[in-house]
Amino acid sequence: FLSLAALQHRAAAGGQGGDSVFGDYARALLLSSVPNSTVFWNIDQLRWLEGTDAHELTVHFLSRIAHVHSVVPQATELSELKVAFAQYHKRHFRLWLGGSSFFPDRVEAAMLPGIDFCRHQEGVAKPSFNKARRSVQLRAVKALKAGEELFVDFGMRDQTDLVVGAGAPGDSSAGVLMPVPLDTDPNAGMKAKILEQLRWPAEVRLREDETQELRALRLATMPREEFSAWSVGA
């Protein structure tokens, strides 16, 4: 988000990069509305969130933003860093970008200029990385009619994400994400590696009417003997 803040700072000042593709993207961001992220809230407003995951996450993000600004205080203003962070939090995707020799299945956080201006809706068009072409493509789950609005699936956003990113919860379908318990498991490292290889999320989503990704929870809570037999069979 530091790069995003610097890019917008230069675009606003009409400096270097103003005529580039990224300059156009930065100017488009400057013209778009800024999410009402909790990183903009004052101390009294943040007290409303005390005791919640949203408060803990906001404090963590504010610390990160302050640390980045303390390292490069002349690169951009603190207020610009907060704006860039709010935009990044709302617009970023998590997807596989080819991995590396050590972590071939690693999923990365990425900004996709242009695609990120589409509105979010789960279960519709999703970005995917084409390794042969070294490019990101959108894959729709159904045929689109001429003139139909294109929605993009940015990935799961639970109520905590929505509160921190936009300042208000979403509808009940957003649910709450709970991390699967791996901290005290003697096979935690192996189970985490399997989750990464299978590209299963390391959290369970709790909704009013259902619980999603129970397979990850089932794997995380397997006793040692059962896990050993399961992993050999897999």
Image (spheres, rainbow, N blue to C red):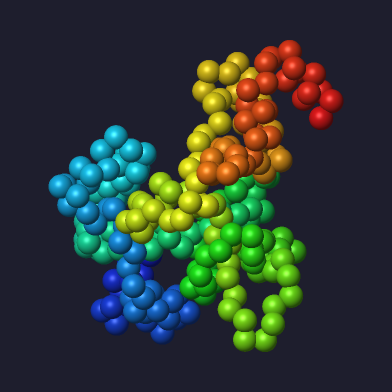
Between residue 6 and residue 228, name the one nearer to us: 228
Q: Nearer the viewer, residue 17 or 173?
A: 173
Residue closer to the observer: 118 or 174: 174
Whether residue 15 is situated above or below residue 171 in the rendered picture: below
Please give the name of the residue rendered at 34% of the width and 79% of the height, measured from the top-left corner: 31
At a point 22% along the width and 54% down the height, the residue shown is 41
Q: List the single residue furthest toward the top.
A: 225
Left or right of 46? Residue 160 is right
Q: Residue furthest left?
A: 44
Q: Is residue 163 left or right of residue 128?
A: left
- Coordinates of residue 113 in the picture (x, y in percent): 50, 71
Is residue 63 visible in the rendered image? The answer is: no
Which sits in the foreground, 71 or 228?
Answer: 228
Q: For the image shown, how many numbered marks are present on the structure?
A: 0
Q: Is residue 65 visible?
A: yes
At x 36%, y 70%, the residue is 7
In terms of image quadrants, where is residue 57?
A: top left
Q: Give the x, y percent position of residue 174.
A: 50, 51
Give the position of the N terminus as an image quadrant.
bottom left
Query: Residue 91, position in %: x, y?
Result: 46, 63
Within the image, what quadrant is residue 140 found in? bottom right
Above or below — where is 223 with respect to 66? above
Q: Is residue 157 above or below residue 124?
A: above
Residue at image position (67%, 21%) is 222
Task: From the top left corner, tell me how far across and down residue 172 is, in percent.
Answer: 48, 51
Q: Is residue 206 left or right of residue 53?
A: right
